[in-house]
Amino acid sequence: MAATAAEAAASGSGEPQEEAEALSPTWDESQLRTYSFPTRPIPPLSQMLTDTNLVYPALKWDLEYLQENIGNRDFSVYSASTHKFLYYGEKKMEMKFHEFVEKPQDIQQQGGDERLYLQQTLNDTVGRKMVMDFLGFNWNWINKQQGKRGNVTPAHYDEQQNFFRCILFPPDQFECLYPYPVHHPCDRQSQVDFDNPHYKRFPNFQNVVGYETVVGPGDVLYIPMYWWHHIESLLNGGITITVNFWCKGAPTPKRIEYPLKAHQKVAIMRNIEKMLGEVGPLLNTMIKGPYN
């Protein structure tokens, strides 16, 4: 599956932090937010692929091009008063793409600090030029990358695999990031405020260590399942447009081998939590029933 995401802000947005290694001459470390936890740079090897031709036709996608070719459908746009988008509790509205482009200008003229975020799966409503761009993506390259093993790449994690840009945390740091419960609207997101962590509530967050990189035009970052990723735009970096790919992971192994790997523990914990959430009310009724 492919999706395109665009972010617009009346002022800037933000992107990773300390120990960043400049992979592109178009940004510098002053544009990276600083956090309390250490990070390690992701080397431009199998995890961080620079200057690829994966989505070469999309390099020309700017707001003007998208406005002309993305179609006249309604898009779901999230609005937030800060630089953080939780996708729950945020103001959500439907608007045309040209309205999404024009609204930040209106916000800036009014002296506001509202930020907008649009994420949309590509579909058959887009214009012919974008369809041709999409067909021009290097799908053979994507299929080859899916066969590789051992790739390493508010924070959240996916139960699918995708290509993106961000600060990454491996599954073995699950307990340091304090995810919301499975049935919470913010499922798969961290409860910790990275800008102002509450160490009394989340003491293990003091032990977290991230892996970070900055992905520029033509670059690709592979993110395995269950790896947490904290996504940001560069400070004063203007509007950002990204193309993401999701694919199903490897089939479930026929037997479980011990010791369990970190991502297997996460998957098992999620399934147990889901099961308890579904059968919990029934068990409660069974236990209380004879005594009420």
Image (cartoon, rainbow, N blue to C red):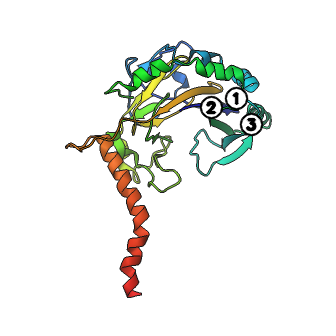
Inspect the image, locate mark 3, and give the three-letter code of the amino acid beneath it: Arg
Left or right, residue 69 beside residue 225? right
Inspect the image, locate mark 2, and give the three-letter code of the amino acid beneath it: Leu
Measuring 52% from the left and 14% from the top, which residue is drawn there?
Answer: 53
Inspect the image, locate mark 1, and give the three-letter code of the amino acid beneath it: Val
Secondary structure beneath label 1: loop
Q: Are marks 3 and 2 in contact (CB under 8 Å)?
A: no
Nearest the eye: 209 or 1 = 1
Question: In the image, which disc is placed on residue 126?
Answer: 1
Question: In the image, which disc is placed on residue 235?
Answer: none
Residue 214, x across and y down, in percent: 49, 23
Secondary structure beneath label 2: loop
Q: Mark 3 or mark 2: which comes first in sequence?
A: 3
Question: In the image, which disc is placed on residue 122?
Answer: 2
- Would residue 207 be visible to someone looking at this image? no
- Would residue 73 be visible to someone looking at this image? yes
**207 shown above or below 269:** above
Residue 71, x across and y down, in percent: 74, 30
Q: Are marks 1 and 2 in contact (CB under 8 Å)?
A: yes
Left or right, residue 10 beside residue 153? right
Measuring 56% from the left and 17% from the top, which residue is drawn there?
Answer: 217
Measuring 43% from the left and 27% from the top, which residue is drawn there?
Answer: 222
Question: In the image, which disc is placed on residue 73?
Answer: 3
Nearest the eye: 35 or 250 = 250
Give the Cα separation between the discs numbered 3 and 1: 9 Å
